[in-house]
Each structure stands twice: as structure tokens, then as C-alpha cells.
């Protein structure tokens, strides 16, 4: 079965601090893409960061970075210098061969002033 | 291009009625996906199209659900004889696969929220 598990339903962080969201996944495939999507309240999902499974180097996008451990099937998201606008649901997802994207249940992140 | 658009944004209906949602993907995207999202959960895959061909359907897509993409552009998702359990956000997403630009990323619309009374 191809599944995504996010074990932290809710997290909070103080503004300007760093927070890490966890994600594990299960697949027998070797080539796939991993993603973190952000869904602000009542707004559409937008891509935060993506990682190709064949790349060993961890992806970074400004304040967002990932820790990709392929053997452990782990894909965590680190948000540095948290901002109030980072408050949202965060979904971990992966896609294999351009087929359907599978999502975790999400982590609700609250950034406190 | 303004991205993926969905219509209506919110639909309230009575149990047993039929509803139809429309999705207009990003124009150069050949893949179109439908997902269902209930409160506090991640999106669940329903079906996807490549051009006009429906390539995969989830077991979540009961026989009351039908999706079409007749000309490979916009898509409709129809739910017949709605039930209260159908209440959810229905998300549409699109992507382009093939060539050198396949990033795997899906671009999402804002969703159509269905409330069945």
C-alpha cells in the first residue's frame, strides 16, 4: 500500500522560531516525487517545496527546507524564522509516475506572535 | 492564465438532489484530477484524466459519481442522489506530464464546497 503518515495533527511555534513537521511514507517504488503543500484557512493549496526521490541533496526554498531520508522513507519540513503568514494546514504528499498524488492527513501549524 | 478555477464555490442542496461541479484547468495542462477533502483531513483521490481519457478511478467514486472531460479541457463532476455523507470540499487540480517540464506538481483550484442537508 502507498500511504503517507503525518503523526503531528497540530503544532505551534513562536514567531521567528524554527519548527519541523514530520512525514513518513510507504512505497515499493524507487522513483517518485515528494511534496509539502500549504493550505491557509479557506484558501487553496499551494506548493511549498518539492523533492525528487533520485536526488540525495535536500531541497530548500528560502525559509523552507526538507530532510529527506530515502531509506527511512522520511520527509520532514523545516520552517525557519516562522512568520504569522505561515499559519496553515501543511500536507505531505507523494506522486509516482505521474499518477495520483497521495496525501497525509495534515498538520495544523499555528504561528504565535 | 489565472490558474485552476472551480464553479460553484459553494453548493447547498437537499438530500437526493443531483449536483454538478465544473473545473477549468490551466490551459496547457493535460492532466486533470478530482479530490475530495473532508474537514481536518487530507485530500482523497477520486479520479484523474489525461486529455479526455479517464485513466483511474478510486473505489471512493461510487456509481452515484460520474466525471467527464469531453474535449480534454474543462471537466465536470456530477453527484446523483446526494447523501449527507457527500458533504465535503471537492478539489480539482491539473498538471502537465510529458516532455521536459514534468515536475510532478499539481496545481489546485480553490475547491467547491458541498453541503447536503
Image (tube, grey):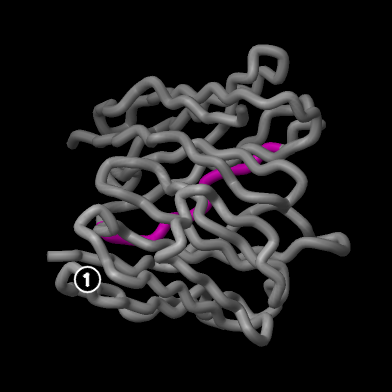
* Residue A13 visible in the shown view: no
Q: Nearer the viewer, residue B2 or B36?
A: B36
Whether A17 is drawn above or below B112: the answer is above
Left of A31 or right of it: where is A48? left
Q: Which quarter of the picture shows residue B11?
A: bottom left
Q: Chain of mark 1?
A: B
Q: How many marks?
A: 1
Residue at 71% in and 14% down: A71
Residue extending farthest to the bottom is B71
Residue at 25% in and 47% down: B39
Query: x%, y% of residue B10?
Result: 25, 73
Whether A88 is drawn above or below B74: the answer is above
The secondary structure making up most of the magenta span is strand
Residue, disc 1: B16
- Please tell me whether residue A6 belongs to the stretch shown in magenta: no
Query: x%, y% of residue A33?
Result: 69, 40
Residue extending farthest to the right is B99
User: What span is colored magenta in the figure?
Assistant: A42-51
Category of crowding for the residue at label 1, using alpha-carbon neighbours closer than 10 angstroms: few (below 14), some (14–19), many (at least 20)? some
Q: Which quarter of the picture shows residue B57?
A: bottom right
Amino acid at each position: 500500500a502507498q500511504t503517507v503518515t503525518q503523526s503531528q495533527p497540530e503544532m505551534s511555534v513562536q514567531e521567528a522560531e524554527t519548527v519541523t513537521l514530520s512525514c513518513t511514507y510507504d512505497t515499493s517504488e524507487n522513483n517518485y516525487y515528494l511534496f509539502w503543500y500549504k493550505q491557509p484557512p479557506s484558501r487553496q493549496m499551494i506548493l511549498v517545496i518539492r523533492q525528487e526521490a533520485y536526488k540525495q541533496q535536500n531541497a530548500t526554498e528560502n525559509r523552507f527546507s526538507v530532510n529527506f531520508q530515502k531509506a527511512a522513507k522520511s520527509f520532514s519540513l523545516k520552517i525557519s524564522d516562522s512568520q504569522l503568514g505561515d499559519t496553515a494546514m501543511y500536507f505531505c504528499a507523494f506522486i509516482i509516475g505521474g499518477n495520483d498524488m497521495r496525501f497525509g492527513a495534515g498538520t495544523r501549524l499555528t504561528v504565535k506572535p | 492564465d489565472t490558474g485552476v478555477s472551480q464553479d460553484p464555490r459553494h453548493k447547498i442542496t437537499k438530500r437526493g438532489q443531483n449536483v454538478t461541479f465544473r473545473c477549468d484547468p490551466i490551459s496547457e495542462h493535460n492532466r486533470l484530477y478530482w479530490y475530495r477533502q473532508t474537514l481536518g483531513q487530507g485530500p482523497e483521490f477520486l479520479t484523474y484524466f489525461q486529455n479526455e481519457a479517464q485513466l483511474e478511478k478510486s473505489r471512493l467514486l461510487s456509481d452515484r459519481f460520474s466525471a467527464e472531460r469531453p474535449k480534454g479541457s474543462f471537466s465536470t463532476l456530477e453527484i446523483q442522489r446526494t447523501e449527507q455523507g457527500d458533504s465535503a470540499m471537492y478539489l480539482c487540480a491539473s498538471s502537465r506530464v510529458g516532455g521536459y517540464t514534468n515536475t510532478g506538481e499539481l496545481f489546485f483550484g480553490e475547491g467547491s464546497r458541498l453541503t447536503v442537508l
